[in-house]
Image: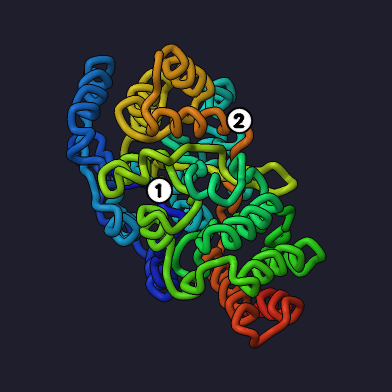
Amino acid sequence: MRRISAGMRWLPYALLGLLLSWLIGCTPSGDGATGGLEFWTMQLKPQFNDYFAEVIAEFEAENPDATVQWEDVPWEAMETKILTAVSAKTAPDVVNLNPKFASQLATRNAWVDLATTVPSEVQAEYLPKIWQAGTIDETSFGIPWYLTTQVTVYNQEILAAAGVETPPATYAELAEVARQVKDETGKYAFFTTLVPEDSGEVLESLVKMGVTLVDEQGKAAFETPEGLAAFEYWLDLYKAELLPPEILTQGHRRAIELYQAGELALVGTGAHFLTSIETNAPDVAKVSAIAPQITGETGKKNVAVMNLVIPQDTADPETALKFALFVTNTENQLKLSQQGNVLPSTQDAVDAYIAALEEKAELTPVEQAAKIGAEQLAEAEVLIPPMEKLNLLQKAIYENLQAAMLGQKTAEEALADAAKQFNQG
């Protein structure tokens, strides 16, 4: 199952703007009817064929007048495919998207407003911070579906050799561990990419450290003492040679490679990574353990969300909403989570998921990671909420941090230039 990626590439803005203009000006090409509900997901075949066959059959049995046609779209094709379909008024009735991309069309009134169509008592069944992740300008565009949340996978042998008894829980502790690991073993403790098009981990770290990224007007709000402290944190680690030099040129995949090679003490990733370690680096897997994700003084932790959205042009909004709520109800979310390495988004499903793991006499490493991930959902949130120009924000911050690391700017200059670059973008 393809996981939610913080570093997912965005559709070029030129194409996005062109198609959004078309969306506003074009006339419907049809009534949207397809002989039944059309449901699109992202790269869930073939692993979940049986699951969806069962869910769809149950829904159709409960709703004899409804039929559901399921189409699974490759991850890399979804953005272009749904944008084209929305523009042409041929969108499916229910579609699986992440909040970052869905929010771009939400501001163009492309989706049904769920704040007014989903009863408040039903909204309350979902984790409140997760429901909020599908809201922009007081309009709710996404019903929460499955989640992934980062955990820390660490090499017990490397930390022990460095004299570290427990893995770092905060960025302050991470800096200390990074020094000990480098001094005692010659290895690196951590890798976080500054490639603008890749992982948003550094961007998220700023929020965890108490930085406000943008204000209510959508302008840069990070040129503050907190922002400077965060810039200096990463700059100091790099200048002290406590971060691999390739963080400037290589993405998060490099962190996985280094960890599996036994050259990295810890990595922030999803529970599914444990399966890859067991396959690709069994010796490293044997000495690996799991801890909660690293955070700052705020205690904030990140979660990635997948939603179901309903296009405005659906021919049957009532049945589309009924189906979306059926797919995301507690029972069906729990089944999906237990079959794949994902987490549910209703409170009852989270409680049942954790309880089922606690009943087991022994947990596999993947189950241990899943349990830790589920337990931190209560305090987890989407740290980078849906916003316009998100890719420009990450680009401005990463490029200027890189310049400071290369000695081309001071931390103060990099911070000011990043804010200026974003505001002018």
Left or right of residue 382: residue 30 = left
Q: Position of residue 34 (x, y in %)?
A: 20, 41
> Of 200 and 231, which appears nearest the observer?
231
Query: Where is mark 1, residue-wise?
Result: 4
Quarter occupied by residue 55: top left
Q: Position of residue 281 (x, y in %)?
A: 30, 48
Query: Which residue corresponds to the image point at 72% horizontal and 69% vertical from the top-left?
Result: 232
Q: Position of residue 415 (x, y in %)?
A: 71, 74
Q: Position of residue 237 (x, y in %)?
A: 64, 67
Left or right of residue 403: residue 349 = left
Query: Which residue corresponds to the image point at 55% horizontal and 63% vertical from the top-left?
Result: 390
- Alpha-carbon neighbours of circle 1 within 10 Å: few (<14), some, or many (≥20)? some
> Of 418 and 209, which appears nearest the observer?
209
Amino acid at circle 1: Ile
Local SS, label 1: loop
Query: Which residue corresponds to the image point at 39% horizontal and 32% vertical from the top-left?
Result: 365
- Asked if residue 300 is positioned above or below residue 128 in the image, the reply reads below
Query: Which residue corresponds to the image point at 60% horizontal and 62% vertical from the top-left?
Result: 183
The type of colouring in the image is rainbow
> Of 418 and 133, which appears nearest the observer?
418
Give the mark nearer the N terminus: 2 vs 1: 1
Query: Where is mark 2, residue-wise?
Result: 378
- Asked if residue 49 is positioned above or below residue 280 in the image, the reply reads above
For the C terminus, which image quadrant? Answer: bottom right
Amino acid at circle 2: Ala
Q: Which residue appears farthest toward the bottom when viewing the image? A: 408
